[in-house]
Every structure is written in structure tokens, then in C-alpha cells.
Amino acid sequence: MKAKGKRQKAKGPPRRGGGSPLVSDPGPPRGIAAGVRRLERAQARSSNSRLTLHASALREARVLVVGDAMLDRYWFGEVERISPEAPVPIVKIDHEEERAGGAANVARNAAALGAQVTLLSVVGADEPGARLEALLKLEGVHTQLHHDRGIKTTVKLRVIAGRKQQLLRVDFETPPGHEVLASKLRDFERMLESADVVILSDYGKGGLTHIVKMIGLARRAGKTVLVDPKGEDYSRYRGATLITPNRLEFRQVAGSWKDERELTERAQQLRRKLDAQALLVTRGGEGMTLFQDGARFHVATQAREVSDVSGAGDTVIATLAVALASGASLRDAVQLANRAAGIAVGKFGTAVVSPSELFGETTIRK
């Protein structure tokens, strides 16, 4: 979005960047300058309208989320003394919270924006799996969960003390069995027809063993495929529409860079190698950068106050999917995702963003 500048050249392309103003000196004659300002205001209104998706459009979006679902548990308490058994704090727990995590958090983020969301995943035949399914139902997510008696549902237990200070995280996880994954693949092929956009959320827990086949099936069906990657083997994601590594994940596969030019070269090289239409590198406090064929588009961060970055990547890919399924262009979808991430990191734990938070109450029409 362009900001108004006091003086502007009559000729010359605008500078790229997250809303850089068109400001230069000397400016055009006074009469022309007035006309330029009117045009600039019109362009700003046009840009705003492009970024405004009505609630009805969001409700029409159909998103299929596939990946590693997990349950996030939080134990909150206070530290009053050190244990006599070992030099560790004793936390007196006073309350607990549970939230859907991993691919399930992606699904709940998309549902919070009003989309029709289905989650396809594998959980254990246990209490955490049942609890996760119940939480997702409450948040409006349709679930197709395969219950594997041979595994435990992935659980991340965080112990929080004082002013939301995380002291400890305990993980419980088991990779799913081959037979359950084969059944999941058959369901995926069946469910493709009723989806506009597919999200493959890879947390490296084994739930996306057949991701190569899934991408192939989805692309042959003409579906947009978004991948949130994990690990160093990105060849598994070849053919996806958009891949969304964070800065650390991108550095692991592409190497370090000295400047923006080298970053662009490495990103474009990886994008071409993976035959992806686009690569979006989320860069924390530096915002996010979209790389397409022959093009680079950067959006500066909009985070006002950072409370917790866990789950921010889930919010980004969920917002991208809902926006694209609702008819937004990729660049507009990136701007919305950047805005959503800025809101999400201001909340504690894995969080969702509502349409009213994302667009403002005045832009949502029922």
C-alpha cells in the first residue's frame, strides 16, 4: 500500500518494498502535483479494496489441511522455592489450558477466518487424541482423524511460571504406522474434489510420509498446494505451488547470505529447483519476502508487540490459503498473512486471528 508523499515525480516507476512512499525532489508543477495526489488517493482506496475480503467470501473458501496434528498443553503456576532433591524450581500448578497444535493449529486458524476447513491427520487411540478431536469440533473444524492404536498422540506439554515464562517443554510422540498412512492417502485422494486449496503442514512427525504422492495428486486435480516445510530434504516438496520456510529453515537448505541480492539469488535458485511457482521466506522481525519467477516482493513486519512466536507460521499459511481460496492475488494474500502474523505473535501460545482483527470491524460485511 502506498503512503501519500508531499512531492512526487511525474515519471519513473515506484520503489519496491512494503509500502514505500513515492517521494522525490523536485516535484511536478503545482497543478500536476494536485492531480497526482488525487490519483494517489484513488490508488490507495483501490489497494484497500483489494485487501478487503468480505466475510461471505471467506465462508466460501474450502481448505483441506493435511499433516502432523498435535495437542498443546500448558500448565501454569508459580515458583516459590527450589527443590531440595535437585537444583530445580518447584512449580505449584494452579491452572491448565489445552489447544490444538501443529497441523491442527493451522486448521483452527483457517476456521477462525470463516473458511470451511477439513483436517486429515493421524492420532493415537488415546485420551489426548479424543481431546484434540473435541477441541477442533468446538472451533468449527471438520476432522478426518485416523486413530492408530500403535501410537501415542503427539503432545507438547509446556510448564509456564510467573509472567508467562516457559520453564520446560516435554514432548510425547510416536510415528504412525504404514497401514494407517496408506489409508490416509486414499482418503486424501477422495477429499481433493471438495477443496480449493490444500495445505501440507510438515512437522517432521511422520504424518506426511506420502507427501510426494499427495502433491502429485493435488496438482493433477488442479489444486493450489501450500507447503510448510521441515528438515533439509526439500526435494519432497517438488511441484508445490508455494513453499513457506522461515528464515532458519531456509538457511538450512540454501545456506547463508550476505545481502538481499544474495538472498534473492539463493531463493530463486531453490524455487526453480523445486519447480515451485513461489517461495515465501518468513523473516521474523524483518517481515516476509515472496519470490516468484523473475519477481521479488517484500513486506515489512507489522508486529506491534511480540508475546510468543510459537504457531506464527501456522497463522501465516492458514491466512494465505483462505485468502487465495477467496479469490485474492498471491501478493495480496501475502500482505494479509503478514498482518495476521503481526497480530498472532502479540498473543500467548498458539493463537488464532479473527476476521474483525485482520480487517477491522468496518470492513467485514455479513
Image: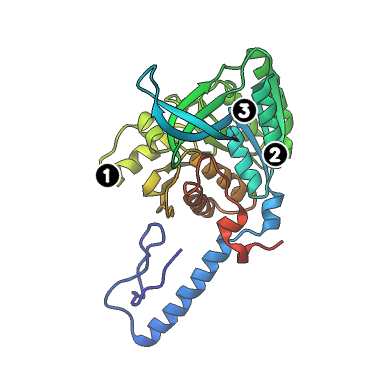
Q: Which residue is mark 3?
A: 214
Q: Secondary structure at mark 1?
A: loop
Q: Position of residue 173 (x, y in %)?
A: 55, 19
Query: What is the distance, in whole Å, between disc 2 and disc 1 at their CAs?
Result: 42 Å
* Marks 3,1: beta carbons within 8 A: no
Query: Which one is in front, 167 or 71?
Result: 167
Q: Amino acid at mark 3?
A: Met
Badge 2 vs badge 1, beta-carbon distance below 8 Å = no
Task: Examine the rendering and report whether any part of residue 197 can be seen.
Answer: yes
Residue at image mark 2: 141
**Is residue 356 or residue 8 the one in the foreground?**
356
Instruction: Say few, some or many: other residues with alpha carbon within 10 Å of mark 3 (under 14 / 14 to 19 / 20 or more).
Output: many
Closer to the eye: label 3 or 2: 2
User: Which x, y percent locates residue 305?
Assistant: 42, 52
Q: Secondary structure at mark 2?
A: loop
**Position of 140 relative to 230 (above/below):** below
Residue depicted at x 44% and y 25%:
231
The answer to which image quadrant residue 360 occupies is: bottom right
What residue sits 34% from the left and 75% below the top?
8
Q: Which residue was labeled with disc 1?
A: 259
Compare marks 3 and 1 and give the one earlier in the sequence. Answer: 3
What is the three-letter code of the residue carrying label 1? Asp
x and y percent of residue 122 in the render? 65, 23
